Amino acid sequence: MRFRLVVTCAAVLVTAMLSASQASAPELCFNAAVNYPTGTFPFSVFAADLDGDGDKDLAVTNVFSCNVSVLKNNGDGTFAAAVNYAAGDSAVSVFAADLDGDGDADLAVANYESANVSVLKNNGDGTFAAAVNYAAGTFPFSVFAADLDGDGDKDLAVTNVFSDNASVLKNNGNGTFVAAVDYAAGDLPVSVFAANLDGDNDADLAVANNKSDNVSVLKNNGDGTFAAAVNYAAGDGPFSVFAANLDGDNDADLAVANYYSDNISVLKNNGDGTFAAAVNYAAGDGAHSVFATDLDGDNDADLVVANQNGDNVSVLKNNGDGTFAAAVNYAAGDSPFSVFAADLDGDNDADLAVPNYNSDNVSVLINCSVGTNHPPVANCKELITVSANASCQAIVTPAEINNGSSDPEDGTNVTLQLVPPGPFALGSTLVHLIVRDNRGAADTCQATVTVTCASCADTDNDGLVDCLDPDDDNDSVADSIDNCPLVSNPGQEDLDRDGIGDVCDNDDDNDGIPDDIDNSPRDYNPGQEDADGDGIGDVSDPDDDNDGIADDGDNSGLVGDHPCTGGQTIGCDDNCPGTPNPEQQDLDSNGVGDACEGDADSDGIPDSSDNCPNAYNPSQNDNDADQLGDVCDNDDDNDGCPDVRDNCPTVHNPDQIDRDHDGIGDACDLCVCVSQGDLTGDSVIDVFDVIEVIGVAFSGAPDIQDPACPKTRGDVDNNGVTDVFDVIYLIATAFSGGANPVNPCGP
């Protein structure tokens, strides 16, 4: 089905309206659309400086309200409320140009239903005089202003939908126009664009024909008359045409928005006003209007398309050769019919204005990509005078040179760089301040830095200031190689080899501790250890523990190579240099003093847990559990009787009972109750036992061994021998009533 627009000022019917499509995720940076009310059914938009204040205002045609809305720019891409000016019936297209030669932008409006063009002259302040109408063809649909006849003023070209032609109205030079001359185009011409297509420096015409699916090219004869149209195929339902240098070869190519095929046809110019076959690029749903300009700041012309049924605009970035990347869509209002790209917010990149037919407003989408950028403005102080430091130089910062440099976009948020950066020597130096904005653009200014010196130092009093003296300290070592150029040090001593001579190095040992508080300024000791608290760091103290025994007592140069042992204290190294131990006690003679050894007796038991730390006792036996090891405990059973006199030293027996008088206390004597004298084992001492003991004592018969202990039964007097005394003892017991030796533990 072909597009057909039937309008009156009372009603508008648009057929072939399709549902909106979903916008894809953006790649360029455009802010969300901000909508500004217009008249009823806005159709076309044009951006131009209408009020002469240097920013771009908007003019929007309104089909149903039959007028044109003017929205003045507030200077920042926002717009004041619309002021409406009457046009003809069904105003569908608007073009702003200086039509009367007075230097301001007037308006030309194509009126679809009244078959004419309205000219509204600018009063010079963005207000407009009443419309003057000029007849065109049948149902004029698009208007374009350009110098068609080469006389320096703007003529008008108008497409007429139902008369299938383009009307040319020549300017009389004052913004009035002669009668239209018509030139045949294709079927249903809906859009016209004037540009130099064949390189002969006059404006030719390109016309998009909606029904015949092509674009007509009408070459200018040089006088504002035109040759017969030559047609080039486009897509399905062309609705808008735009001419621009798309492939960078400096001639005007064509871009055509195709409503029904939802794409853009690109027809490259062969250089002579003829065109190669169209190459199509997908756009949005119902591609209705196309505009070509540099949107991303790379100096080639990108395409932006208003998609009527998609309620969005498509942006197709130029690859640099007239081919285009896939479309990226940005939401607009309801039924966008037209699009215009211009710098609306003054940041030198192209923003978008889109009239939305069904929502009665115009959407403004501000470009927020890097794009083109206003460079910053550098401003320098002309002369800076500073005093030299002790080295007869001066440091000057970029901020001291800066005198209010700024950037149009970023204000004072700029980067400053000074060239040369300094430091600066005595006298005057010309410097340049480079000012960069956040997008990399730069500007420069220059200043003179003068360094003065009222009292520059002359360290060696040779009449030559130090900064000009090759040997400031007069030590015969040139400053360029002197490790302390301002203090005489001909020997160039540098203990820590840090390149700073000791004579002016406040940290000679390079341990991070200034010499004036370092307890050992010549020896590296960042921990400042001082075991004896004598104010001399251990690393350089010959007697760290201050016990009178030198750490390196044998003067070998090594500490600990000959430790004191065996009571020696002279001519040997302190065996425990961190702990005072003047006696140099070393019980185990292992070369480590007991004062700092954890195992004085070397028995494998730490002194802290050794129950006898000064006597070797790895078993840690403690019979009486008194926490004092047996090896150094003189009363092992803790019974109050010293071991040397205790008849049972390992068993507690304070009463020391020894009933068999064998020197072994009963508490630990296994034989105290043996039945001695009872040789026959009948538990009675009688004549038979006497006979047995006589046999043992006099005839050599074997004595009877007691099974419970090493005692024999015949040795009743416990003298270790069975003899006559034992015989006498038993006779007395058996026959005379003497003491019974059988059971001394019994009753």
Image: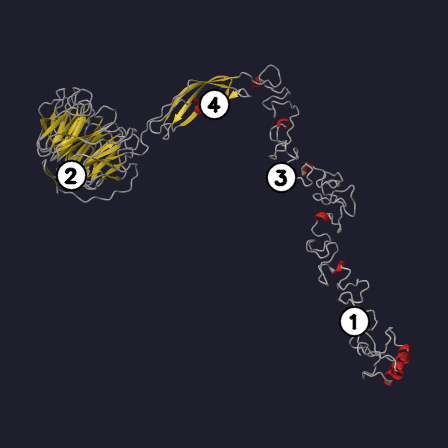
Q: Are marks 2 and 4 in contact (CB under 8 Å)?
A: no
Q: Position of residue 156 (x, y in %)?
A: 14, 26
Label 3 to label 4: alpha-carbon separation: 40 Å
Which numbered disc flags the more N-terminal residue, 3 or 4?
4
Q: Secondary structure at mark 1?
A: helix
Label 4, secondary structure: give it: loop
Q: Is label 2 in a helix, a strand or a loop?
A: loop
- Report if residue 184 is visible in the image: yes
Residue 267 appears anywhere in the view: no
* In the displayed structure image, the side of residue 323 where residue 450 appears, left or right: right
Q: Earlier in the sequence, mark 1 or mark 3?
A: 3
Quarter location, residue 392: top right
Q: Amino acid at mark 4?
A: Val
SS assignment at label 3? loop
Name which of mark 2 and mark 1 comes first in the sequence. Answer: 2
Kind of residue sitting beneath label 2:
Gly
- Among numbered discs 2 and 3, the one appearing first in the sequence: 2
| Labelled disc at residue 237 | 2
Q: CA distance from mark 2 to mark 1?
A: 133 Å
* Mark toward the viewer: 2 or 4: 4
Bin the neighbour count of mark 1 within 10 Å (Cα to Cα): few under 14, some 14-19, many 20 and up: many
Q: Which residue is label 4 attached to?
A: 396
